[in-house]
Amino acid sequence: MVSAVDHTDAWARDSLDRLTALPGVRRAGVALMEGGGRRLNFTSAHHPGEEPATWCHLDAYDDVPLNTAVRSGRPVVGSMGRVSRTHPAFVERQQGTETQALAAVPLVYGNRTLGAYVVFYSTVPTFRDDEVAALCELGASLGARLGEAQADHVRTPGAAVRTAEPGSLVVEFWVPGDPAAVGPARRRLRDTLLLWDVDADSTETAALCMSELVTNAVVHSGSGCWVEVLNESAAITVAVRSAWSPQTVTEAAASDLMQVHGRGLQLVAELTARWGSEPDDDGLTAWFVLEA
């Protein structure tokens, strides 16, 4: 099986090939949000066909054009003189290089900003409105390819938990990578358990615990997730399957996915018969069991 990391690396290579082929570009980079937006994962290249640099972390709170593009959802473009008005320390670090101008542009998928790309120019473009619009369209195109790759390579959670017994009831549904999607997911779970005649207390407990796992998945993995609901042997099992953040998986990133969000996982542990998480090369499945 090809992992989500492999597909993200392939996306980065293709994206950097496109970006470094733009007229006047001497270097390009892509940065993807992770860790709940606390950092960016960055790689770069100087020309088409070059193997990208090893992914590295950037602090999402540093005052650099990439972070401004991610936070604002708007491009940062201009000559180094113009950019120095808003990011003087960054421009000072570019002294001695051939960079004369730059463009930092959000990578957008639907209503989500996944990160940003940056291109460094050896000459100063005019940055007319139509040129800036084209750069933004490129950001949307690259973001769509990344977002679709993330969705395509999140495996259904059933494969990571176990095969359902004959006669069991199983429902699976997709939750988009947007915190606003947690509410509809909670309603979907309640409706499912209502159809299965699960008692009201167990239904509310399941909805509360699933909300915590889905929130963790959406906030920390940077993508959507699959939810599997299994009714068998007088027990309800809910599993939330999320992809890793698009990066080479690190121990810190793996830990980040299961950090307590508010009372969070402590509440899951207290309210359920048992719960746990199962990481693999592609992502993480977090699950809990309620006695029905």
Image (tube, grey):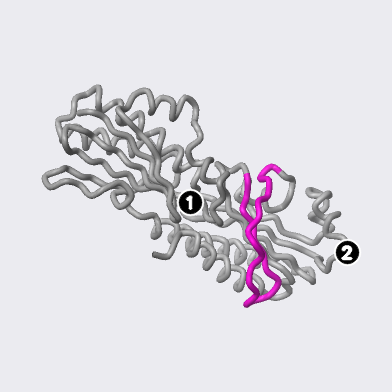
In this view, the residue in front, 281 or 208, is 281
Query: Residue 79 falls in which quadrant of the image?
Result: bottom right
Q: From the top left corner, tell me how far across and down residue 17 is, in percent.
A: 61, 73
Dot 2 and dot 1 residues touching (CB under 8 Å): no
Q: Taking 32 as reference, is 184 left or right?
A: left
* In-front residue for pair 288/35: 288
Q: Amino acid at mark 1?
A: Trp
Helix, strand or loop for disc 2: loop
Quick check: can you spot residue 105? Answer: no
The picture places residue 239, in percent across and down from the top left corner, at 32, 41
Q: Nearer the viewer, mark 2 or mark 1?
A: 1
The amino acid type found where label 2 is placed reads Gly
Is residue 200 in view? Answer: yes
- Which quarter of the figure is the C terminus placed in? top left
Instruction: Provide the secondary structure element on which disc 1 rests.
Output: loop
Taking the spot 62% from the left edge, 56% from the top edge, the residue there is: 31
Q: How many marks?
A: 2
Circle 1 sits on which residue? 244
First to last magenta residue range: 39-61
Q: Which residue is mark 2?
A: 96
Image position of 258 with respect to 15: above or below: above
Which badge, 2 or 1, is on the more N-terminal residue?
2
Q: Position of residue 217 (x, y in %)?
A: 44, 42
Magenta-span inclusion, residue 56 = yes
Q: Quadrant of the N terminus?
A: bottom left
